[in-house]
Image: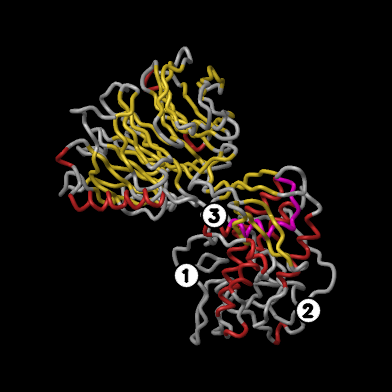
Amino acid sequence: MAKEGEKRYSLSCEILGHSADVRAVSCVLLAGESREHIVTGSRDGTACVWRPDPSSNKDYLLHKVIRKHTGYVSALCVIPPDAQAGRLEPLLATGSQDATVLVHSLSPEVEEPLERYTGHTALVTTITHQHGQLVSGSWDSFVRVWKSGGQSSAFKAHTPAVWTVAGLFRHDGTRRILSGGADHKVKLWEVDSGVCLQEYSGHGDVVRDIKVVSHQFFISAANDSSLRRWNLHSGQCLSEMYGHQAYVYSVCLIPRTSGEEVVSSGEDSSVRVWRGGSCRQVVGIPATSVWSVCCLDNQDIVTGSSDGVVRIFSVDPQTIASPEVIANYESKMEEHRRRSKKSDIDVSSLPGPEALASDGQKPGQTLMINNGGVAEVYQWNADLHQWDKIGDAISKAPESTVYQGQEYDYVFDIELDEGGPTMRKLKLPYNKDTDPYVAAMEFLEANGLPEMYLDQVAEFIVQNAGEYQGPVASGPADPFTGGARYVPSSGVQRGSGTGSDTGGAQDPFTGGSRYRPSASSSGRELGVGPSSSGGGADPFTGGNSYRPREFSQAQPQISVNFTGSRLQSTNAYFPMKEYKLFGSPSDYADKVMGKIREFNGALDQTRQLKAEELTRCHGNLVVAALCYISATRNGNLRTMCQAILNKCLICPSA
């Protein structure tokens, strides 16, 4: 720990503004400024730029918010000015869960990205800049080198994921890079050829971050809770630094210390300061995951963590936070310590085996009991009117963990009793922004389990990770169109849909005039032939039907054939003969359920679907979509899918 007389870091300020985990932090000095701006990327889908408060020597104000990714922001990189190109200001590159890399101006007046790079097929974990080029790494196993115009070259670097890249150009003038990945290795690459020049082995888990010290040395951080210092040329590990109690996510060199002083952060609620290979100070953070750390030029430390707060720590007594801020921070630390001491599963609080004497409330309901100090999980079998044991609940995963090289909010340990001499142990990875039924179906397919377990797996996820909230909407958006939500009104509403405005009620799906059969079209059957009328086109039938312009006639079409009996509809809008395309099964289910919930809310209470019925309907929709996606790989799913789709067709009539 710190020796007497050594500098010690204390809280300087907290920056509040993000609504979810701060996954990445960086800093940038703008032209004409004396203090650096701070840049943050968050799971709330935004990147923010914070400028120093001119009236304070330690506080920051919001300078710019960037909302251009469709997934959360996972990586940041500052692109330095380029005098030769006539660009005097730095730029910002952001990487995202949506697999894209965007380049932005730091000016609040410039809203749209300057460049958009597409090529990765999974979350972008890391970005670096050297010699006029951006280099990125992704969960798709590839490193991509981006050229002007959005073109890129790529090479497979690590399996199954690349977690970090670091360039050497600034240190030795070469175009080589270092990368670290889920295969526990660090690799040295020639960028132009994609040839691996050297491997550095020693870490026992995923390599999360790399910082180059000089043309001779670099430091790596990994999930094996260690940092390692390496000789770049010989490949020898010169020293190991242990102190973190969990994953080490990020490492940064403290300026003007010749690489002898570094700071690291990890999954153990701490930031650690290292000098000469020894841990000299542990700085507590009141959040489990401290995702990222960087250093300002004045040696201040900036952290981003899972509580959505950006914190700055300083050794300068003049910039230490006020007593009130310090007291609030220490109170949060004490509360976090108390919560951390609690067990994930309090077995003693669970009911005993006597709870199995009571009937379940619904098919597939799960129940956890304490049987001799072991947490056992049961599922209600409505057909046999009994509780069936699923397995033993081992524990919940920490707030974030890694499975098969990729990061998840939860990785549950599942033990299945299949009647053999031993329990089958499986891993169930899950992210909070994934529909539980999607995750459950993927888990069953990956492990060759029958679809009959779908409901109980999905309910297990909900029980342990909380209810799925669906995508966050910024306003009352229509779930199908993304526009303003349809609100019934007695007044005449004019729409911008494909139909003409006739003064009648608007169609809730298109925003245009509702289709009304008229004398001029009374001889036509739904979906037969084009309409000859110049207005009031039916958006649902084949006549003058709406076709998204981005899709051509040459695209393959999906046809659905139903067998058995089905309800006959007399509704003028159904069945639909045109199809809307969705980005994913979850996207499909969320948007359809948004419309179902809206219609359900308009019914009187005696006819409304209950909350649990809506939840089950949502799950059926997800499974139906998943079945069709999986049908080409697994023909056995067709029968199940058919039955579920027929269930979905049975809806209370308005």
Q: Position of residue 612 (x, y in %)?
A: 61, 71
Amino acid type, residue under disc 2 in the picture: Gln
Name which of mark 2 and mark 1 comes first in the sequence: 1
Q: Which numbered dot is residue 476? A: 1
Q: Position of residue 13 (x, y in %)?
A: 24, 47
Label 3 neighbour load within 10 Å: few <14, some 14-19, many 20+? some
- Report helix, strand or loop for mark 3: helix
The C terminus: image quadrant = bottom right
Q: Position of residue 531 (x, y in %)?
A: 70, 75
**Which is more toward the observer, 424 or 296?**
424
- Report helix, strand or loop for mark 1: loop
Does the magenta-highlighted stretch encompass residue 109?
no
Residue 93, picture quadrant: top left
Mark 3 or 2: the one toward you: 3
Amino acid type, residue under disc 1 in the picture: Pro
Q: Which residues are magenta?
A: 447-461
Q: Is residue 593 left or right of residue 324?
A: right
Identify the residue under disc 2. 568
